[in-house]
Amino acid sequence: MDTVNPAFSSLFSQLGLDNDEEAMQQFIASHQLPPHVRIADAPYWNAAQRAFIEEAILEDAQWAEVIGHLDSSLHQ
């Protein structure tokens, strides 16, 4: 049974991360963030990933909703 939103695979691919179901679940489980840390400020993003996330959120781009879901998943 798939437990990760299917749109995550496209986002993970866009971020240059493995995007199969197991890899996405592992990333989410091993990269949890404290409540006060914004997704764009997570220490594990490189400069390009951070810029992509920031820009998508600021411009309310097509990726903003999926990034919001990832943000929620990383703050569980």
Image (cartoon, rainbow, N blue to C red):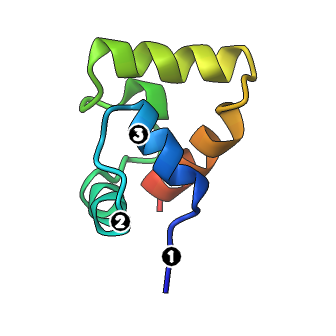
Disc 3 element: helix
Few, some or many C-alpha atoms within 10 Å of disc 2 (few <14, some 14-19, many ≥20)? some
Q: Secondary structure at mark 2?
A: helix
Residue that appears at 38% across and 67% down: 21
Residue linked to disc 2: 25
Please report the residue visible at 70 percent of the width from the left and 41 percent of the height from the top: 65
Q: Is residue 14 above or below residue 46?
A: below
Q: Is residue 52 left or right of residue 65?
A: left
| Residues tagged 2 and 1 counted as in contact (Cβ below 8 A) | yes
Q: Secondary structure at mark 1?
A: loop
Q: Position of residue 36 (x, y in %)?
A: 46, 38
Q: Is residue 37 visible?
A: no
On screen, residue 13 above or below 69: above
Place of residue 41 in the rendered image (x, y in percent of width and height, measured from the top left): 39, 25
Q: Residue 24: which quarter of the image?
A: bottom left
Q: Residue furthest bottom?
A: 1
Query: In this rendering, which labeled residue sits more in front, label 3 or label 2?
Result: 3
Q: Earlier in the sequence, mark 1 or mark 3?
A: 1
Which mark lies nearer to you, 1 or 3? 3
Q: Which residue is mark 3?
A: 13
Residue that label 1 marks: 3
Tag 1 near tag 3, CB within 8 Å:
no
Q: Nearer the viewer, residue 21 or 74?
A: 21
Residues at marks 3 and 2, CA–CA distance in whole angstroms = 14 Å
Is residue 51 rendered to the left or right of residue 60? Answer: left
Q: Earlier in the sequence, mark 3 or mark 2?
A: 3
Query: x, y percentage for residue 57?
Result: 65, 23
* CA separation in Å, label 1 and label 3: 18 Å
